Amino acid sequence: MIWNETKECMSRDELEFLQSKRLVKTVDRVYHNVEFYRKKMQQLGIEPGDIKGIEDLHKLPFTTKNDLRDTYPFGLFAVPQSEIIRIHASSGTTGKATVVGYTRRDLDIWSECVARALSQAGVTRGDIIQVAYGYGLFTGGLGAHGGAEKLGAMVVPMSTGNTKKLTTMMKDFGVTAIACTPSYLLHIAEVLEEAGDIPNIQLKAAICGAEPWTDNMRRQIEEQLHIKAFDIYGLSEVMGPGVACDCEYHKGLHVYEDHFLPEIIDPDTLEPMEKGETGELVFTTLTKEGLPLLRYRTKDLTSISYDKCECGRTLARISRFKGRSDDMLIIRGVNVFPSQIEAALLEMGEVTPHYMMIVDRQNNLDTLEIQVEVDERFFSDEIKSLETLSKKIAHVIQNAIGLAVKIKLVAPKTLERSMGKAVHVIDKRKLI
Ligand code: DLL
């Protein structure tokens, strides 16, 4: 039985009692099994026994993406490597990926969380669901897949990249639900509309996430495809998709608080914010075995409401995201840090580290052009050598960020120099 199928949630008191019990256990586990946390806690002068419940959460150290990078690849794992049965990875801030690992129980709980989200979106075992998030190191594809199987729906593991095949199968199989990024769903809707195929599909629900979107985008998707669309949130470090999802009232995303303890902090002072205020979302995992995290700074800006939802759920709700407190961009669902581009360019001799990323959206698909300044020593008017160079740069950057890019080479000293903090990104995408 999926807990949320019945909406019979615990009272807040029961939930907080469970969270406290699980927090104490998690702190004890990381203290004894992860050197990084033991050292951090010792520096702060805390022992596991000092943490008696969630009221002591603020005493614990924070964890950041850089901590995962510094302990790359497996340094924060809390179990022997033989107990890790799956690895995923997401972009690091520079060259190295952030690696996450799951035990069998972690994968079970992950599937249960995604199954809850799907069931919140009205998906049942009678549904046929196309999973059109990328499969592979990204958590979207396999994460959504596991949840859909747990629910007992029939899964069509599309992954990304072949929209024609996707729309054909959608019609032929009578697909009733889809999981993909909201911008990709808008693109799919456009392709279906152009082919006059909207009346020929059976789709009724979409579970979209992995990138920021708006209520207007949701309404456009719903009207164009005559379906209900839901917002699913998650991040690889904490688990993947299924940390939170909205319900039919769309008044915030219910956090699966029996597994993830949320807080909102001021990103500058790192102090907890007042209830309802907007700040940076921080999660402590409560049941994870492979990679338990204390106070992981997501860098996502939002607020939390603890009021009971109209749907009856007592779980806290996070509001739609208001941006990030760092410079990470999400392009076609892929997380990109400008520092990754810079690191890749610095490794090449022919160009300077002066660059500008221009992000746009055409036919609902994100595009990325990178303008790169050629080093004076290598600059020539010969078109052929410039073409070869731009192909080489495109290749190096694609390898670094996992995304196809268009390179525009510019003459030395043409990109504007900034007097203050360098501006490396022009984001022309407008979220409708
Ligand atoms: O994007 C996991 C995921 C896959 C979520 C599929 C939902 C659906 P990462 O690649 O680690 O994991 O990226 C995590 O993506 O910190 C947010 O900035 C952003 N993000 C994820 N879901 C949403 C959403 C996956 N619903 C980062 N709305 C997070 C806005 C989102 N931003």
Image: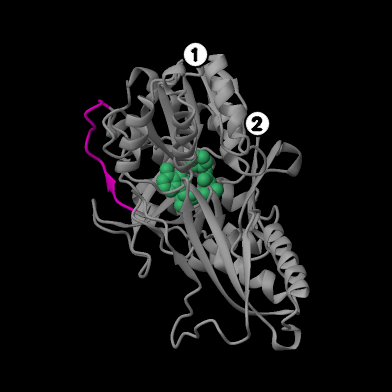
Q: Residue at x 54, y 21 (%)?
A: 170
- Looking at the rendering, the stretch of residues picked out in magenta corresponds to 302-312
Amino acid type of the residue tagged 2 in the rendering:
Arg
Q: Residue at x 57, y 53 (%)?
A: 31
Return the x and y of residue 300 as percentages of the image width and height.
41, 55
Say which quarter of the image contains residue 132. Answer: top right
Return the x and y of residue 152 as percentages of the image width and height.
54, 15
| Label disc, if present, on residue 125 of the rendered structure | 1
Viewer-closest of 48 and 145: 145
Question: Is residue 247 in view from this perspective?
Answer: yes
Tell whether 399 sits left or right of 167.
right
The secondary element bearing badge 1 is classed as loop
Q: Residue furthest top?
A: 126
Amino acid type of the residue tagged 1 in the rendering:
Arg
Question: Is residue 286 in view from this perspective?
Answer: no
The secondary element bearing badge 2 is classed as helix
Pick whichever of labels 1 and 2 is earlier in the sequence.
Answer: 2
Queried on whether the Cβ of the residue with tag 1 lies below 8 angstroms from ligand 1, the answer reads: no
| Label disc, if present, on residue 415 of the rendered structure | none
Viewer-closest of 396 and 309: 396
Q: Main secondary structure of the magenta part?
A: loop
Return the x and y of residue 104 as percentages of the image width and height.
65, 31
